[in-house]
């Protein structure tokens, strides 16, 4: 009710809630990773019976190459983000592990970064949230300035915040992932000079990469 009426009153920004990140959003993860790096595949080739050989089918083992892109995923946990939207965000993180990504660093933010960096090495069914205050992208980009070894930063948000100053770090590419097309069209124009944009399609959670 507080969220719907924008009347959080005395409820603090440290309100914690627990969500289930068990949705299955469909996403072209390779397309997302290509936004950050020309070559996203490692040189380590592994044989697997879970994938058919291109020439001989399942009679011979196929091969798989793992992603080496180092990702930082920043999730907007401000008061304007609904529980369903947050479930979608953490579910997107979870699905990366089905495509060979060995680890993803995750931070939560509202008006500030509300948690220490969390390194996910496997899908998480339950995630503890800390935040639900206002929204400020500045602390996320400041964190990026201090940690320049990431190939890509994905900022999952509804976009309702002032436009931050551009970071000096030009190595790490930024992708703004919006909760819907409406939020993308409303908020991305002011952010497009900072990175590329995408949004989750309604009812399918299929990001449209722009």
Image: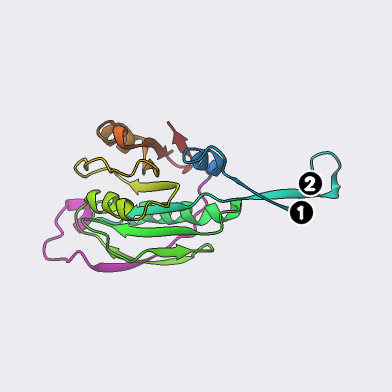
Badge 1 crowding class, 10 Å Cα cut-off, few under 14, some 14 to 19, many 20 or more, is some
Looking at the image, tell me whether mark 1 or mark 2 is earlier in sequence order.
Answer: 1
Residue at left 42%, top 31%?
210
Residue 116 lies left or right of residue 44; in this view the side is left
The foreground one among 6 and 106 is 106
Mark sitting on residue 27: none
Q: Position of residue 79 (x, y in %)?
A: 23, 55
> Toward which corner of the image does residue 13 lie, by quadrant?
bottom left
Q: Position of residue 73 (x, y in %)?
A: 40, 53
Up-down relation of residue 133 to residue 181 (above or below): below
Badge 2 crowding class, 10 Å Cα cut-off, few under 14, some 14 to 19, many 20 or more, is some
* Residue under label 1: 47
- Asked if the stretch drawn in magenta spans residue 7, the answer is yes
> Toward which corner of the image does residue 173 lie, by quadrant?
top left
The foreground one among 182 and 103 is 103
Up-down relation of residue 198 to residue 122 (above or below): above
Q: Quadrant of the N terminus?
A: bottom left
Secondary structure beneath dot 2 equals strand
> Toward which corner of the image does residue 3 lie, by quadrant?
bottom left
Secondary structure beneath dot 1 equals strand
Residue at left 32%, top 59%?
108
Span shown in magenta: 2-25
Residue at left 16%, top 52%?
6
Q: State the count of labels.
A: 2
Up-down relation of residue 181 to residue 8 (above or below): above
Q: How is the image coloured?
A: rainbow
Q: Position of residue 184 (x, y in %)?
A: 33, 35
Residue 188 appears anywhere in the view: no
* Camera-nearest label, 1 or 2: 1
Residue 151 lies left or right of residue 191; in this view the side is right
Disc 1 to disc 2, C-alpha distance: 10 Å
* Residue under label 2: 52
């Amino acid at each position: 009710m507080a969220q719907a009426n924008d009347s959080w009153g005395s409820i603090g920004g440290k309100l914690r809630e627990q969500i289930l990140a068990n949705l299955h959003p469909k996403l072209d993860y390779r397309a997302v990773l290509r936004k950050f790096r020309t070559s996203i595949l490692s040189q380590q080739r592994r044989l697997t019976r879970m994938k058919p050989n291109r020439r001989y089918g399942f009679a011979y083992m196929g091969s798989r190459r793992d992603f080496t892109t180092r990702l930082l995923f920043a999730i907007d946990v401000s008061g304007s983000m609904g529980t369903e939207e947050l479930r979608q965000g953490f579910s997107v993180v979870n699905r990366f592990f089905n495509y060979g990504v060995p680890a993803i660093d995750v931070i939560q933010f509202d008006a500030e970064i509300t948690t220490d960096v969390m390194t996910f090495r496997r899908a998480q069914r339950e995630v503890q949230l800390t935040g639900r205050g206002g929204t400020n992208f500045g602390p996320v980009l400041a964190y990026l300035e201090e940690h320049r070894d990431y190939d890509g930063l994905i900022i999952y948000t509804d976009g309702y915040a002032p436009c931050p100053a551009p970071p000096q770090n030009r190595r790490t590419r930024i992708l703004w992932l919006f909760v819907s097309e409406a939020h993308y069209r409303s908020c991305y124009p002011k952010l497009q000079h900072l990175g590329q944009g995408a949004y989750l399609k309604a009812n399918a959670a299929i990001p449209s990469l722009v």
